[in-house]
């Protein structure tokens, strides 16, 4: 009998150590990215958009830190109950479960808000896309609120039948968050396609990607990866899909992933803006060496056309500047 108890104790300790270790690794990655994002935002000066992003970055950091602390304390309470037979951790675990739910769901909403914002600023001339994003935001909020209520009810529930029923309803939150991210990612993909088509029409074939295109592609690829995470989350909610330790590990990873993704978005866009400012400065320095486009010369008056001109071609840069305005200046 003692062997059975010892084996179960060792297994439980191993699961707790693995869960906390993986959570710590992902949290460490997130902390580095959060510091980089904060530094870039502070370096770029004051603006309303940057101030809001900085505050959101701090709030996500607080939520993520609180979530990790709550998980570690919960695991320690479980380990304490394994060593002390008379100790009942139920009440303490219920309290810390509330903290985990509040911190993680708060980050889910903030992450979705940043994702929606990123797609929002790309299209200021298409009302239907913005209405669609607003509906997605409302759906995500409702899904997170209902999931929080169900998780807390499940934590305080003693009936297994009720817990199973609640598990089926809990699929609503990841489904709503997945839909929001699919739509936001699709909007970014649409912008990438339109940008490439316009570049091809106006400038012809280009073998080298522009900096705007690179950041849009990064946003698109990271959005696809994030959608895959929510698909896995939906699958994980199916009873019997993952082992107990697998569920714990994924539950620890998911909040970190939802914090890492919006932080990467902030870094991508902010770094893109810095690169854009550098490119503009270099371009202004080299303008004297670039002859005027024939198209622009033809639009000027005859006396002006006879003058030797060394102005950079404007037609080739209109699209680039317009995209830079959407990707950088209005948003970061």
Image (cartoon, rainbow, N blue to C red):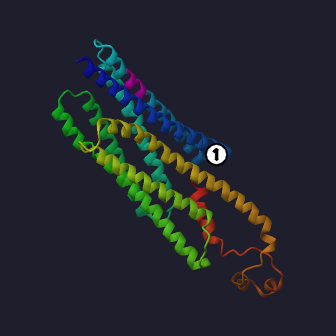
Residue 294 relative to residue 226: left or right:
right
Please tell me whether residue 289 is drawn above or below residue 213 in the rendered image: below
To which residue does mark 1 refer?
40
> Is residue 72 on the magenta stretch?
yes
Residue closer to the observer: 2 or 182: 2
Q: Main secondary structure of the magenta part?
A: helix
Question: Residue at left 59%, top 44%?
Answer: 37
Task: Answer above or below: position of 30 versus 211.
Answer: above
How far across and how far down the image is residue 228, in percent?
38, 53
Residue 326 seen: no
Image x and y of residue 93, in percent: 33, 23
Q: Nearer the viewer, residue 284 or 97?
A: 97
Left or right? Give the position of 309 relative to 164: right
Pointer 1: residues within 10 angstroms few (<14), some, or many (20+)?
A: some
- State the residue lying farthest toward the bottom: 302
Residue at 43% from the left image edge and 56% from the top image edge: 224
Image location of residue 258, percent across then percent down: 44, 44
The number of callouts visible is 1
- In reply to whether residue 56 is colored magenta, the answer given is no
Q: Can residue 5 be seen at all in this image of the molecule? A: yes
The residue under the point 37% across, 40% down is 250
């Amino acid at each position: 009998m003692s062997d059975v108890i010892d084996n179960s104790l060792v297994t439980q300790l191993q699961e707790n150590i693995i869960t906390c270790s993986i959570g710590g690794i992902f949290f460490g990655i997130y902390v580095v990215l959060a510091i980089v994002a904060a530094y870039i935002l502070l370096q770029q000066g004051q603006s309303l958009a940057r101030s809001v992003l900085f505050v959101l970055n701090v709030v996500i950091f607080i939520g993520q830190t609180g979530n990790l602390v709550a998980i570690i304390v919960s695991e320690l309470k479980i380990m304490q109950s394994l060593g002390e037979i008379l100790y009942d951790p139920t009440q303490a675990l219920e309290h810390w479960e509330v903290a985990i739910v509040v911190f993680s769901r708060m980050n889910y909403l903030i992450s979705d808000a940043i994702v929606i914002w990123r797609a929002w600023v790309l299209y200021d001339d298409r009302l239907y896309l913005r209405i669609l994003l607003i509906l997605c935001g409302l759906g995500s909020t409702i899904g997170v609120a209902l999931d929080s209520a169900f998780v807390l009810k499940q934590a305080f529930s003693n009936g297994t039948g009720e817990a199973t029923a609640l598990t089926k309803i809990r699929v609503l939150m990841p489904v709503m968050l997945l839909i929001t991210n699919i739509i936001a990612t699709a909007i970014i993909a649409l912008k990438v396609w339109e940008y490439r088509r316009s570049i091809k029409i106006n400038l012809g074939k280009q073998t080298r990607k522009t900096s705007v295109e690179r950041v849009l592609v990064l946003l698109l690829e990271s959005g696809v990866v994030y959608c895959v995470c929510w698909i896995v989350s939906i699958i994980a909610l199916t009873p019997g899909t993952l082992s107990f330790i697998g569920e714990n590990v994924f539950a620890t990873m998911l909040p970190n992933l939802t914090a890492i993704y919006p932080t990467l978005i902030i870094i991508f866009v902010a770094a893109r803006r810095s690169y854009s400012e550098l490119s503009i400065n270099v371009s202004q320095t080299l303008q004297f060496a670039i002859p005027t486009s024939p198209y622009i010369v033809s639009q000027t008056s005859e006396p002006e056309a006879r003058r030797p001109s060394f102005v950079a071609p404007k037609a080739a840069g209109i699209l680039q500047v317009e995209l830079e305005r959407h990707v950088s200046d209005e948003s970061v």
